[in-house]
Amino acid sequence: MSLPTPYLDLDLDVVAVRHEQLARALPGTAIHYAVKANPHPGVLDVLAGAGAGFDVASPAEVRAALETGTSAARLLYSNPIKRRSDIAEAHAAGVPLFVVDTADELHKVADTAPGAGVLCRLLTSGGGSDWPLSRKYGAPADDCVTLLTEAAALGLDPAGLAFHVGSQQRDPRAWGTPIAQSAAVFAALRRRGLRPWLLDLGGGFP
């Protein structure tokens, strides 16, 4: 049989096995697949059937995730830079959590997704990864405390923090520093009477 070039062969059994391996390696966590990595419906269907949630970054990705039958409650809108109309569409669809890293983005969410949960994107160095993301996204720890405190004042749920150690991260110790920084941010927020409850470890697993 002659196949077109280029040709992509998807082994959905391998997709299921990789999800199971990651879930075993990270007990007690909720696995959310980044739709941008490969939005093929077959991949998304297999992962939804295995119980994964989805990390989405656009209205098209929200729709693709929902077409698997996954509840919108299992979606996380991780793109820190969003159009107001995109936030509103995702909120109307039931997406409960949005990532921000600036005051402008926080106010967009407050205006267009009232009552939603927010995660502040914590800045990381990206050291040890093939593609660091530190120049694109993230706020220092002190700024995250300020932003999440303001989120509560705006009627949002200051749910916690998100970070990303860089794509294709080769050093398993890279997660240690941002986890420790997150603990300090959570402690600072609790001293202010807030109750953060979620830490998003991001991707980057090679």
Image: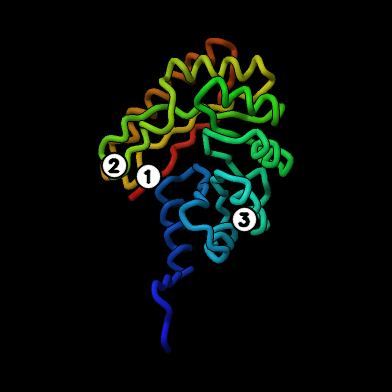
Residue at point 59% right, 34% down? Answer: 98
Image height of 102 relative to 5, above or below: above
Number of disc labels: 3
Measured Cα–Cα span from mark 3 to mark 2: 29 Å
Q: Which mark is residue 155?
A: none
Q: Amino acid at mark 1?
A: Gly
Measured Cα–Cα span from mark 1 to mark 2: 8 Å
Residue at point 64% right, 59% down? Answer: 68
Check disc 2 and report its element: helix, strand or loop: strand
**Image quarter of the N terminus:** bottom left
* Circles 1 and 2 in contact, beta carbons < 8 Å: yes
Nearer the observer: mark 3 or 1; the answer is 3
The residue under label 1 is 204
Q: Position of residue 76 (x, y in %)?
A: 58, 41
Nearest to the observer: residue 77 or residue 205? 77
Q: Position of residue 198 (x, y in %)?
A: 54, 31
Q: Amino acid at mark 3?
A: Ala
Q: How many residues crowd mark 1 within 10 Å: few (<14), some (14–19), many (20+)? A: some
The residue under label 2 is 129
Image height of 53 relative to 8, above or below: above
Q: Which mark is residue 64?
A: 3
Q: Residue furthest bottom?
A: 1
Image height of 150 relative to 47, above or below: above
Q: Amino acid at mark 2?
A: Ser
Q: How many residues crowd mark 3 within 10 Å: few (<14), some (14–19), many (20+)? A: many
